[in-house]
Image (tube, grey):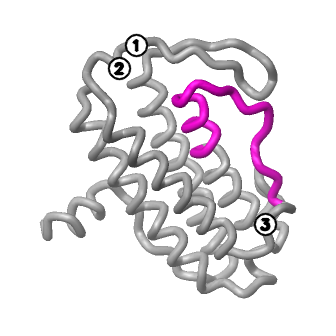
Amino acid sequence: MDVARIQELYKYNAWANGQVFESVAKLTPEQFNKDLATSYRSVKGTLVHIVGAEWIWLRRWLGTSPKALWDPAEFSSVEQIKNRWEEVERERKEFLSDLTEDSLRKPLAYTNIKGQPFSYPLWQALQHLVNHSTYHRGQVTTLLRQLGAQPKGTDLLAYYDAKFGQR
């Protein structure tokens, strides 16, 4: 994995998260908070998990190991979650702009929220996070459909179509 590919992967991740926020912004507060008996209970809970995980991984890349993810109860609206995501996104762009081929290969040592130590090459942790967010964006898509809402596409090829006008 090289720096240019990681940076492009994160451009895709930002675009896909933006697509999700556009879809979710159309929900009523009742739909947004409705308990759908899933992993993170609701669209709100799943969004908080996605953004909170992106934050916690960024903190790890920057050398700290937070002890907990965010609590969905701290957020009352889509806009609040989106604002936090935009903060994470700005800080992450700065981090990614400083990557080098050498830094991608260096081990990233951290402690997870259960207190367990782990270490992976940075490039693996960077790829993991995009995969993690993609998985949970898929869950949001399912939740939106259950609520009768129309999700926007977030596939990687849809990103390339949007970026390069392919088809």
Q: Residue at x 75, y 43 (%)?
A: 69
The image's mark for residue 103 is: 2
Q: Are marks 2 and 1 in contact (CB under 8 Å)?
A: yes
Instruction: Look at the picture and state if 61 lies above or below 24.
Output: above
Read off the residue under disc 3.
75
Span of residues in magenta = 54-72
Residue 78 placement, left or right of 62: right
Residue corresponding to mark 1: 106
Res. 47 image quadrant: bottom right
Tell me the residue at 35%/15% (across/down).
105
Q: Residues within 10 Å of mark 1 (few under 14, many from 20)?
A: few
Q: Is residue 79 left or right of residue 151?
A: right
| Label 3 environment density (alpha carbons within 10 Å; few <14, some 14–19, many ≥20) | some
Q: Is 66 positioned to the left or the right of 155 in the image?
A: right
Mark 1 lies on a secondary structure that is loop
Q: The C terminus is located in which quarter?
A: bottom left
Q: What amino acid is found at the position of numbered circle 3 in the picture?
A: Phe
Distance from Cα at disc 1 to Cα at disc 3: 35 Å
At horizontal 29% and vertical 64% (from top left) the residue drawn is 158
Q: Position of residue 112 (x, y in %)?
A: 71, 24
